[in-house]
Image (spheres, rainbow, N blue to C red):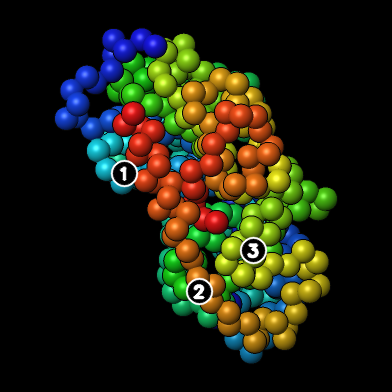
Amino acid sequence: MIFVAVGHAQPFDRLVGHMDRLSLKLDEPVVQQVGRSAGPVHCEGFDYAASLGPYYDQARLVVVHAGVGITLELLKMNKPIILVPRQQKFGEHFDDHQIETAEKFNATCGLEYILDIEDLTIDMLKNYSYIAAYKEDSLRMFRENIGLILHA
Amino acid sequence: MDESHEIKDPASPVTLLLAATTGGHLTEGLGLFEGLGDTRLVVFSEQTTRTEGMGNVYTYGRTGRGTAKTIFCAFCKALFVIRKEKPRWVVTTGAECGLGAILAAKVLRRRTIFVETACRYRSRSKTARILYPLVDVFLVQHAESLKLFGKKARYIGGLFG
């Protein structure tokens, strides 16, 4: 199963619609958490769930907007992830910070990200299996140092 | 610095009030500060289905993102929370909730920390630009971000990198 998650804040019709169309050509199910986005029509979808954990567990591949929280959660679960950052020019967010997030995850973990939605192809979805490693060094460093600040 | 409301016993844990708008800001704040040794974490955020299920949390009603009214509501509720919990530090990862809480902390003379979101490394958030001159400790989560701010900014690690 390919799981798509786009959060709740704003619609992400570009990704939801694209994955909906591609689902017709895939030989495995596509399930989409769509938030305020329109559709989907051809595959299973829902607006909101208290926990997305069960969907992550079942998914072979997760295609997700470039939110830090959801990406870190998936990295820790050792799931193959493709990031599709929301872009201001499409009205998907108030600025392009999700592109920065995707660039940073790409640089530090090698996560793949898509800017032009047409680059998210059937072949890519069928064959993608890269599992990026989450490195805790930076977080460990933060927690050691913040302890010194808080207790000073 | 008004220390009159602060916990003085050195054996007591440091109380930390984490103020963050629900969603990514709160996720980042919890990822950074939850479970630290010798600290007691109190959360201040918006009233949502997520925060309803949390322990040790204070919430305020959401009135509309980015509005002065929302910040004012957060400020008023934060005054109450800070007086009641007496945190040594008020910490925020953004956005409107953090603005209101830091302003309240300044009024009540509590020490303050702002942590810029890990989402950014080559741009500055609006909250960061506003709070940079106000907070006692200003942290970024990527070393490259230091060049975006003045000398007060520090990099001590972050959620990933």
Callout 3 secondary element:
helix
Mark 2 vs mark 1, CA separation in Å:
27 Å
Same subunit, tags 3 and 2: yes
At x 60% / y 21%, what residue is drawn? B133
Label 2: few (<14), some (14–19) or many (≥20) C-alpha neighbours in 10 Å: many
The circle on residue A113 is none
Marks 1 and 3: same chain? no
Q: Looking at numbered disc 2 in the image, what kind of residue is underneath it?
A: Lys
Q: Nearer the viewer, mark 2 or mark 1?
A: 1
Q: Which residue is mark 3?
A: A107
Q: Nearer the viewer, mark 3 or mark 2?
A: 3
Q: Nearer the viewer, residue B138 or A89?
A: B138
Pointer 1: what residue? B36
Is residue A45 at least partly visible in the picture?
no
Residue A31 on image: x %, y %: 58, 73
Q: Quadrant of residue A34?
A: bottom right
Image marks 3 and 2: residues in contact by CB distance under 8 Å: no
- State the quadrant of the N terminus of chain A: bottom right
Dot 2: element: loop
Q: Is residue A56 left or right of residue B68?
A: left
**Residue A79, disc:** 2
Describe the element under mark 1 as helix, strand or loop: loop
Q: Specify which label sits upstream in the sequence, 3 or 2.
A: 2
